[in-house]
């Protein structure tokens, strides 16, 4: 049906899902981009929301955290930690088949 290396996929949906997974793995290897952190000047102590340096109070919860007392957003300080990156493949491998949907006239669970 849809060849992808050493095995075939069942449908276009799963072929595209496999492609998206490969692209996501490539993107995870890239360095962080500051352009994706528009509000990283100070972090609210109450709700952990990131705020613009001009904000005198948290734009999410309204906590009057003075920006001068907050840690500036420098690497390793003031930012919420990055999510853990795992090289593990979250999708089931080709060696562990997923259950097939029931065929017409069959009930699931048989």
Image: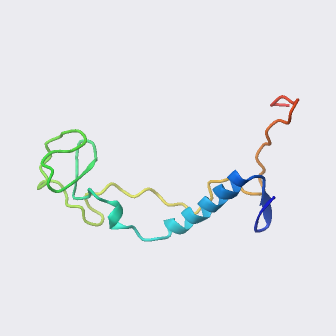
Q: Is residue 13 above or below residue 72?
A: above
Residue at far right of view: 105
Residue visible at 78% across and 50% down? Answer: 97
User: Which quadrant holds residue 21?
Assistant: bottom right
Work out whether residue 91 or residue 10 is closer to the camera in this orientation and state it.
10
Residue visible at 60% across and 59% down? Answer: 20
Residue visible at 18% across and 39% down? Answer: 62
Residue visible at 55% across and 62% down? Answer: 24
Q: Looking at the image, what colour scheme do you see? A: rainbow
Query: Measured from the top left, where is residue 50 in percent x and y?
Result: 26, 52
Query: Measured from the top left, where is residue 91 in percent x and y?
Result: 65, 53
Work out whether residue 45 or residue 1 is closer to the camera in this orientation and state it.
1
Q: Look at the image and tell me in which quarter the C terminus lies.
A: top right
Query: Measured from the top left, where is residue 102 in percent x and y?
Result: 82, 35
In the figure, is residue 3 to the left or right of 34? right
Q: How many marks?
A: 0
In the figure, is residue 64 to the left or right of 17? left
Q: Is residue 65 above or below residue 23?
A: above
User: Which quadrant holds residue 82?
Assistant: bottom left
Query: Measured from the top left, where is residue 66 in percent x and y?
Result: 12, 49
Q: Look at the image and tell me in which quarter the N terminus lies.
A: bottom right
């Amino acid at each position: 049906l849809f060849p992808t290396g050493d095995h075939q996929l069942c449908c276009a949906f799963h072929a595209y899902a496999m492609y998206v997974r490969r692209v996501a793995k490539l993107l995870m290897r890239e360095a962080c981009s500051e352009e994706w952190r528009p509000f990283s000047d100070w972090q609210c102590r109450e709700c952990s929301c990131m705020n613009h340096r001009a904000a005198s109070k948290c734009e999410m919860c309204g906590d009057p955290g003075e920006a001068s007392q907050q840690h500036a957003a420098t690497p390793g300080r003031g930012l919420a930690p990055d999510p853990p990156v795992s090289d593990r493949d979250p999708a089931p491998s080709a060696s562990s088949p997923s259950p097939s949907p029931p065929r017409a006239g069959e009930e699931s669970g048989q």
